[in-house]
Amino acid sequence: MRLKSTLCACLLAVSLCAGAQTTVSIAPDAASKEDVRKLFDVMASRDQMRQIMQQVFAQMQNMNREQLKKRHPDVTDADLARLDRQSEDLLKNFPLDEMLSDMIPVYQRHFTKPDIDALITFYSSATGQKFLHEMPAVTSETMRAVYPRIQAEVDAALKRAEEKGDSTQK
């Protein structure tokens, strides 16, 4: 159940971001769509997004399975397998290319053509390529490092909400 909620939250966040992007005005000195696409290619943005999403979903899936088992000991292996399949289907059918296209006007709003050219130069360099190569692992390790803190805060907030609800019913 929690995995489904987490997946829904992720999709909502992505859709809100995508919705916001449709109203972006482009700066007069903005890079062209082709310039931004070249940056995305140099950055291997599609592959990076795919890798990060796979890692984040895998970590969330594992952590949520543990939490689900703790809170609902009667959850069956069949239930967990069904949730796993739903997650895999979601990832497999995620519209990465469309998301990248949606991002172009945002980059055009925030970066000039010289900015994009400089980013292309940086990400084409050995250091830029190393940065791109290491980011999925850094993101994965970061998620593992901060998840316990996030989970503790969420649990504390839920407990406070339950206690507040109990006190208002008396």
Image (cartoon, helix red, strand yellow):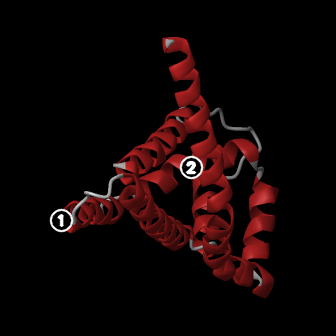
Q: Residue under circle 1?
A: 78
Q: Is residue 17 left or right of residue 83?
A: right
Q: Is residue 157 above or below residue 112?
A: above
The residue lying toward the viewer, choosing from 124 and 128, is: 128
Q: Mark 1: which secondary structure? A: helix
Q: For residue 90, which quarter of the picture?
A: bottom left
User: Within 10 Å of the Cα at label 1, are there few (<14), some (14-19), or many (20+) other Cα atoms?
Assistant: few
- Are the two marked residues, 1 and 2, in contact with CB atoms closer than 8 angstroms? no
The residue lying toward the viewer, choosing from 98 and 141, is: 141
Q: Position of residue 52 (x, y in %)?
A: 54, 68
Q: Residue under circle 2?
A: 103
Residue type for callout 2: Met
The residue positioned 41% from the left and 58% from the top of the image is 70
Q: Position of residue 44 (x, y in %)?
A: 57, 74
Q: Position of residue 29 (x, y in %)?
A: 77, 44
Q: Is residue 88 above or below residue 136?
A: above
Mark 1 and mark 2 lie on one chain; the one further toward the N terminus is 1
Mark-to-mark CA distance, 1 and 2: 38 Å
